[in-house]
Image: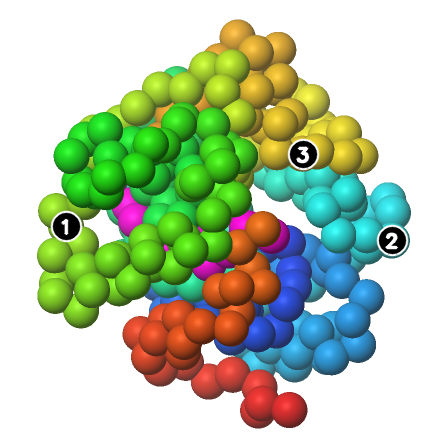
Amino acid sequence: MFDRYRVIVVTPAGRERYLRLLAPHVLSQPEVDEWHLWVNTTDAGDLAFLHQLAAMHVKVRLIEPPLQPPNGTATIGQFFRTTIARDAIYVRLDDDIAWLEPRFVARLVAERIADRDPLFLYPLIINNAVCTWLLQKFGKLQRNVILHPWCMDRVGWQSAEFAEALHRWFLDRVRAGTVDELRIPRVTAALSRISINCISWFGADLLAIGGEFPATDEEEFASVELPMRLGLVNRVSGQAICAHFAFYPQREHLDRTDLLERYRELVPAIELPPAR
């Protein structure tokens, strides 16, 4: 519990190679009451890992698809109908979130409770095109490259080489203990699509629509259409920081680097199912 709210982390799941990094971070955060893994895969190995993880940790619950069988990003939206508890604050983390700062959940949920106006609240996400633009605009990221505040920016979203350099820059910050210097003020977003690698919301706010999202493109619905429909905005809070590994144009390149191993060196000590 945090204040009077249950804190429920949700993750569209999932790829074992990434969840092995994310799981220790989530399970080591004391404010997390439950971690709901949305079963959105048909891969036998990944499914086995999810079931083993749930058997090992009481906070982990597997949420089966409520309407349609798993089909990648096309079936994520259906799971939002399971996130409408009035007494809960939800934190969505993509399965390839590679790093959470210590007390990440406490920081984000505290910001969420303190700022009731936005529908969805984002943390500062490393390797998120809009957040990268914000880092540059606030003078935190010194790079001689033109970035735009658009979720599919040709550099911040598309360039694998830029993403690799960004991760290495950030990892150097983590090692040096200077992550605090990256925090930025709150920024309001309206009619602007931002990748929802991590967002937070009150279950009561989605109860009005029964948590019903469209069958496809839940990201544009969450970041643009639903706030507009409800007369609300979204907001980025720069007081909680996480790192997102890769968008699909970056993934093949980044998977070939040593970056996952470098992030693996930073995970808390939490028991996981044995590697296959």
Direction from residue 93 to residue 45 in the image, left or right? right
Mark toward the start of the polypeptide (2 vs 1)? 2
**181 falls in the magenta region:** no
How packed mark 2 is, by other alpha carbons closer than 10 Å (few <14, some 14-19, many 20 or more), is few
Tell me what residue is drawn at x 36 percent, y 32 percent: 147
Name of the residue lying farthest toward the front? 144
Q: Which residue is mark 2?
A: 69
Name of the residue lying farthest toward the top? 231
Q: Nearer the viewer, mark 2 or mark 1?
A: 1
Direction from residue 268 to residue 36 in the image, left or right? right
Question: Relative to 47, is 1 above or below?
Answer: above
Tell me what residue is drawn at x 69 percent, y 22 percent: 209
Q: Main secondary structure of the magenta part?
A: strand
Note whether residue 99 is visible: yes
Q: CA distance from mark 2 to mark 1?
A: 42 Å
Q: Which residue is mark 3?
A: 218
Name of the residue lying farthest toward the right? 68
Is disc 3 in contact with disc 1, using a CB cutoff of under 8 Å? no
Direction from residue 239 to residue 22 in the image, left or right? right
Amino acid type of disc 1?
A: Asp
The region drawn magenta spans 238-248
Q: Which residue is mark 1?
A: 180
Q: CA distance from mark 3 to mark 1?
A: 32 Å
Secondary structure category for the residue under label 3: helix
Question: Relative to 176, is 207 above or below?
Answer: above
Which quadrant, please, contains the C terminus? bottom right
Occupied quadrant, residue 12: bottom right
Mark toward the start of the polypeptide (3 vs 1)? 1
